Amino acid sequence: AQTVTQSQPEMSVQEAETVTLSCTYDTSESNYYLFWYKQPPSRQMILVIRQEAYKQQNATENRFSVNFQKAAKSFSLKISDSQLGDTAMYFCAFMKTNAGNMLTFGGGTRLMVKP
Amino acid sequence: DTEVTQTPKHLVMGMTNKKSLKCEQHMGHRAMYWYKQKAKKPPELMFVYSYEKLSINESVPSRFSPECPNSSLLNLHLHALQPEDSALYLCASSPGAGGPYEQYFGPGTRLTVT
């Protein structure tokens, strides 16, 4: 079974600064996918970024980028130029290939962006 | 339209009541999911429907009964719930269940059992 660990229950960052959220996972699979989901207060969960394990290049989406270290089983999320709208719960999630599209979530990191 | 809608937004029910949660998507997705989420915790998978058939039941108590009348609609029927069932119930959909597909989440129904 896979496990996903987010070691930072809460973090805060000043507006316009950069913050990195940590995620580690444990799996014996060689082929899999990793996701970061964002859940703002009282709003729905949305996908921030995804990474295919077979790709060495780190995924980037505008201000969001990941540092994927497959050997270390680490998948951190960097948010650049933080904005107030980035305040949310962030979940790291793991998906095996050909396993019914099921997600295994980490415990979440609550990020507060301060003005 | 990349939206998953859920009704009602909030629901308060007694332990003897019967109620239903509704989830709809019009993206042509063929897989739909029910999750339960407690405060400050990640979502926990309850059920997966693939092509309108129940494919995964994560050992959910029978007081929760899912139904998928068609490919756009997913219901969760509730009966004789316990106070510990109070939570945010999230619905999600994806193009298929074969993966890897992004799951699109609805805003959830906040359920309180009194």
Image (cartoon, coloured by chain):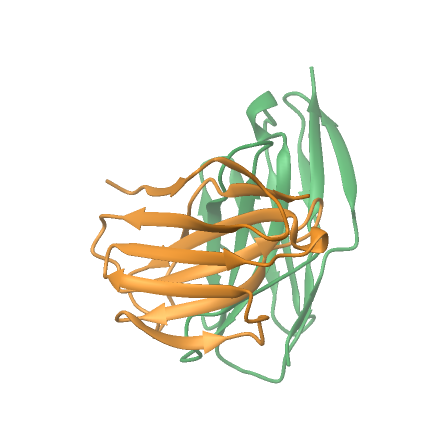
List x then y, in percent, for residue A95.
Answer: 50, 69
Q: Nearer the viewer, residue A7 or A64?
A: A7
Vertical relation: B11 (above or below) A49: above
| Quadrant in which the C terminus of chain A is drawn | top right
Does the rendering let one see residue A6? yes
| Quadrant in which the N terminus of chain A is drawn | bottom right
What is the count of numbered marks? 0
Which chain is drawn using orange?
B
List x then y, in percent, for residue A30.
Answer: 53, 82
Name the side, left or right, on which B69 lies relative to B36: left
Does the rendering let one see residue B103? no
Q: Residue at x 34, y 57 (%)?
A: B74
Vertical relation: B1 (above or below) B85: above
> To which quarter of the image does residue A39 belong?
top right
Vertical relation: A115 (above or below) B69: above
Q: Residue at x 20, y 56 (%)?
A: B28
Which chain is drawn using green?
A
Q: Nearer the viewer, residue B60 or B5?
A: B60
